[in-house]
Image (spheres, helix red, strand yellow):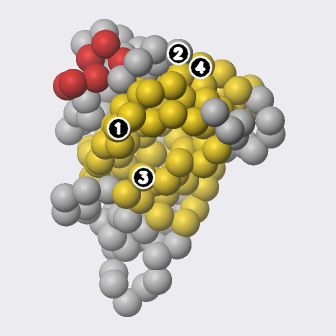
Amino acid sequence: DSSVPAETLCAGQTTDSNATFSEISYKQVTGCTAGNTLVSCSVDFYNLTDVDLKFGAYSDNGSNVPDQLLASGEVTNQTISNTYTTLTMTFTGTPDVVPADGIIWVAVIPSKASQGIRTTAVGGTPVYTSSAYDATGSGGDYSNYANNLKTTAPFQAYGGNSYRMCVTA
């Protein structure tokens, strides 16, 4: 809805801890305004070394699992050495709109293994408050970078970390 100003909503922790990731990783962001056009997403990284990143926004399947690709883009040759740097990436092409449930799963996948991302270990329920991922070679592992992002989200499990990700719509 172009009459509603874009808003940025985030999910995940901002404590100072980090982990490495090599697979497509997702974070559920709730409370987005239904009908707003997807503009960009942001991810808090710890460090990146000359890496390409594909990023996207997925709908929810109604059971707290990422589902259909709504918007995507790619940035290349990213190097971040400043601890806990937020990288904002603008969706390209013709992004879709936020679905009626207001849930967006932000996704990011690196072209190389072991990239640093801001995280907090989480526990308890609901389990989807942590980040989700797919590390299978045919699904979301960095070794399959050329074939990601997929129209239907590859999903393997919920992880033990909570990544910091945002969506602007």
> What is the three-letter code of the residue carrying label 1?
Thr
Q: Which residue is mark 4?
A: 20
Q: Position of residue 113 (x, y in %)?
A: 45, 14
Of labels 4 and 1, earlier in sequence is: 4
State the separation of the CA atoms marked 2 and 4. 5 Å
> What is the three-letter code of the residue carrying label 4?
Thr
Of labels 3 and 1, earlier in sequence is: 1
Q: Secondary structure at mark 3?
A: strand
> What is the three-letter code of the residue carrying label 3?
Met
On residue 89, the disc is 3
State the separation of the CA atoms marked 3 and 4. 20 Å
Of labels 2 and 3, earlier in sequence is: 3
Q: Which residue is mark 2?
A: 114
State whether residue 20 is above or below residue 32: above
Question: Where on the picture, by quarter, is residue 158?
Answer: top right
State the separation of the CA atoms marked 3 and 1. 11 Å
- In front of the other: 88 or 98: 88
Relative to 117, 152 lies left or right: left
Question: Where on the picture, by quarter, is residue 84?
Answer: top right
State the separation of the CA atoms marked 2 and 1. 16 Å
Crowd band around label 4 with a 10 angstrom C-alpha radius: few (<14), some (14–19), many (20+):
some
